[in-house]
Every structure is written in structure tokens, then in C-alpha cells.
Amino acid sequence: MRTSVRATAVHLSDQVRGAAQGHLGVKPVPTGRAAFPARTRQLTSQATPEGNQLVMSDIPRKRLSSYALATAAVASTALLLPSAPASAAPVVATTTALTSTAPSAAPISTARLRAQAAALAKAQSVLRTAASLKGRPYRYGAAGPRAFDCSGYTKYVYSRNGIALPRTAQQQWRKARKISKLQIRPGDLVFFGGSYKYHVAVYAGDGMVWHSPRSGSTVRKVKIWTTRWSAGRVI
């Protein structure tokens, strides 16, 4: 009679675990004694500060009864069942709180916007003046308005727009605020050379400059022809 009850318990536990695995969409695992190695694990309940918890301990398989095997099979199926995420709501609430309290970018002040607009308008005026002198001949030491050398040309262009510059390219480099090539914008100055600047031009955008190049040439707009240049800003 006891053997029949144990066999029935094993059969029922296999059915319960098979139904649970089918519901979860997982691959069935072996049941009964075939599911356990020579040494297997026993589930026991122990009291902990968090409540009763299942604890696994190794015991020889030959010491397990059929009823114990059935109990372990049912317990292993129960371990596969997903538990309700009790902490889901607090986590979402915390995330929302962090998102809502994130600092926002500081707005640009009206004074700064006005300064940027004024600088843009000044740069456009500088470019118009530079373009208006197209074709004027180069002459060493000349600062306009009929002829120019390189620094005489930039000095004249900026003076017509209310910006005073020194006479030579090196002096203009010392006065200008140094900026990177990535920061350059139309209306800035382009200086050629290493530590000593031998030539200066007005940046026109798209890698182009207005300049008075050399003897026998005239004021013109050209592509920057070398990588050995630096940028400066006076607007």
C-alpha cells in the first residue's frame, strides 16, 4: 500500500511539473530518480530574519525515498515560477523622481544674445568692406585706400568698421584673441607662419580668405593654401 502511494505521488509531481513547464514555455527536464545524480540535493525549510527560506543540502541518492524524490521535483518546479516584482513600483517612482529633478540648461541671457547678434553684424560688415576692395594692387608698405600690403589691407578693412589694429602682421597677431581652427568664423583673422607671422588675411568662410598677397598681384579671395596658419579674433 505504501509503495502504491509513493508511486502515485511521484506520478502526480511529474504531472504538476510538466504542466508548469508547459505553461512557462520551458523545456521539460527529467523526473524521478533519473533526474538525480549519485549524490543529490535535499530541500529543507529554515527560519531566517527575512522569513522561512528553502535551503539545499547534498545527500546520497540511495537515501532518498520515492516520496522525497517527488517532493524535490515539485519544489524544483516551484522554483521555476516567476515571482511578482514587488519593488517594481518604487523603482519606477524613484526613476521618475530623479528625472524630474534633473537640472535644466541655463537659458542664454538677453545681453549675451544681443552681443552675439552685434558681433555677427560687425563680421558681415567687415566682409563687405574686404570684398569692396577687390582688385586693388599690392604695394609694400601701403595701407590704402588705392594700394595695400597684407597687414595694411587688414588694418584698413577693420578701421572702416570701428576696430583699430596695429600696423604689422606680427603686431596684429599679438593683439588678437587666439582661437582654434575649429572656432574660426567669417570676419576673423588668419595668420600665416610659425611663431613669427609673416602674412595676415580676413577669413571669408568655407576655408577662403580675402588678402593682398604679394607684389604684382591684387586683393582677391582665395582658398587657404597651407596648413601652417593660426586664427585670431578682434570682433
Image (spheres, rainbow, N blue to C red):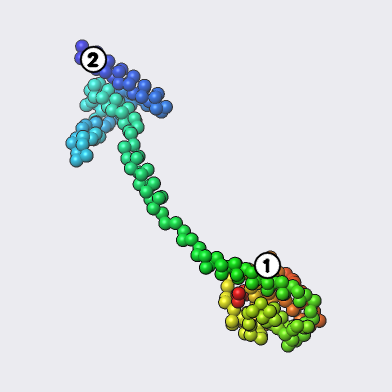
Looking at numbered disc 2 in the image, what kind of residue is underneath it?
Val
Q: Secondary structure at mark 2?
A: helix
Q: Quick check: 59 left or right of 147?
A: left
Q: Which image quadrant: the C terminus?
A: bottom right
> Looking at the image, is mark 2 or mark 1 earlier in the sequence?
2
For the residues labelled 2 and 1, the Cα–Cα distance comes to 93 Å
Q: Quick check: 69 left or right of 143?
A: left
Total numbered circles: 2
Q: Which mark is residue 205?
A: 1
Percent coordinates x, y for residue 121 in the rendering:
64, 69
Q: Which image quadrant: the N terminus?
A: top left
Q: Nearer the viewer, mark 2 or mark 1?
A: 1
The residue that appears at 59% across and 79% down in the rendered structure is 176
Of residues 98 and 191, which is closer to you in this image?
Answer: 98
Of residues 54 and 213, which is closer to you in this image?
Answer: 213
Task: Name the outermost residue toward the top.
Answer: 1
The residue that appears at 77% across and 75% down in the rendered structure is 134
Q: Secondary structure at mark 1?
A: strand
Looking at numbered disc 1 in the image, what kind of residue is underneath it?
Gly
Q: Does any portion of residue 84 appear in the rendered image?
A: yes
Q: Residues within 10 Å of mark 1 (few under 14, many from 20)?
A: some
